[in-house]
Amino acid sequence: GQQLNQSPQSMFIQEGEDVSMNCTSSSIFNTWLWYKQDPGEGPVLLIALYKAGELTSNGRLTAQFGITRKDSFLNISASIPSDVGIYFCAGQPGPSGTYKYIFGTGTRLKVLA
Amino acid sequence: DGGITQSPKYLFRKEGQNVTLSCEQNLNHDAMYWYRQDPGQGLRLIYYSQIVNDFQKGDIAEGYSVSREKKESFPLTVTSAQKNPTAFYLCASSIQGAYGYTFGSGTRLTVV
């Protein structure tokens, strides 16, 4: 099945550092979502993007919908220990109104205090 | 509070036995999904259902079965035909449109 490519696959950073990760696809998506999964829990939606070029923030998190519609980026500023987890991107390839999303392979973030 | 509930949180099964994982939502969502997550892996779609009494296979449906008799419920049965059933199983639901999924907290299945 189709999956999105996320990079990096994992990263260790020091507390207070900024983090950047991205998600790429070979096909165009109409919606991009970013989720965070804490260990042993289900993913929780962080940010949703609906338009090419859109830049949206949620606290220390900022995400962008790439202008080619084939990629998306997530930045976390001034990381803290509770940022640890797996970050997934998800894209909706169909027109608005379809249900199915394609998920990325995840970026595993570890923050060193 | 509206949400999606998976039970149990942890489940142990003997080889050769079928086991059913529960997923219930009170969000009035039309669509429901089952994903499998293995250590260090992403989410792989097992089955999904857009309306009651209808469901479609995902990418890894072999060895699994589902039913959708009620809008609120979408149980997943892991059958003895599933060769590597030990994994973390996530249920999700959504409404039509670009609003993403709401996930449950998952069930960790271990075959002993």
Image: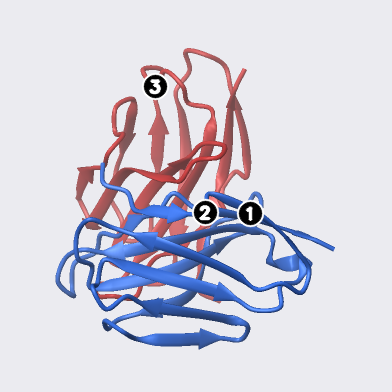
Chain colours: A blue, B red
Q: Residue at x 31, y 34 (%)?
A: B60
Relative to A8, does residue A47 appear above or below in the rendering?
below
**Which of the pair B69/A24 is nearer the observer?**
A24
Q: Disc 2, disc 1: CB below 8 Å? A: yes
Question: Disc 2 designates what residue?
Answer: A8
Report the amino acid beneath label 3. Answer: Gln
Q: What percent of the width, then of the height, locates residue A56?
A: 45, 86
Q: Residue at x 43, y 55 (%)?
A: A6
Within 10 Å of the Cα at label 3, are there few (<14), some (14-19), or many (20+) other Cα atoms? some
Q: Which residue does the image show at 22% across and 56% down from the upper left? A: A26
Depth-wise, is mark 2 or mark 3 nearer the camera? 2
Label of residue B82 in the image:
3
SS for callout 1: strand
Q: Residues within 10 Å of mark 2 (few under 14, many from 20)?
A: some
Please, which chain is the residue tagged with disc 1 on?
A
Left or right: residue B78 compared with residue B61? right
What's the distance in space between the residues labelled 2 and 1, CA to CA? 7 Å
Q: Which residue is tagged 1? A: A11
Q: Residue furthest left?
A: A95
What residue is rendered at 51% in x and 57% in y? B104
Give the spatial CA distance, label 1 vs label 3.
33 Å
Residue A1 seen in this snapshot: yes
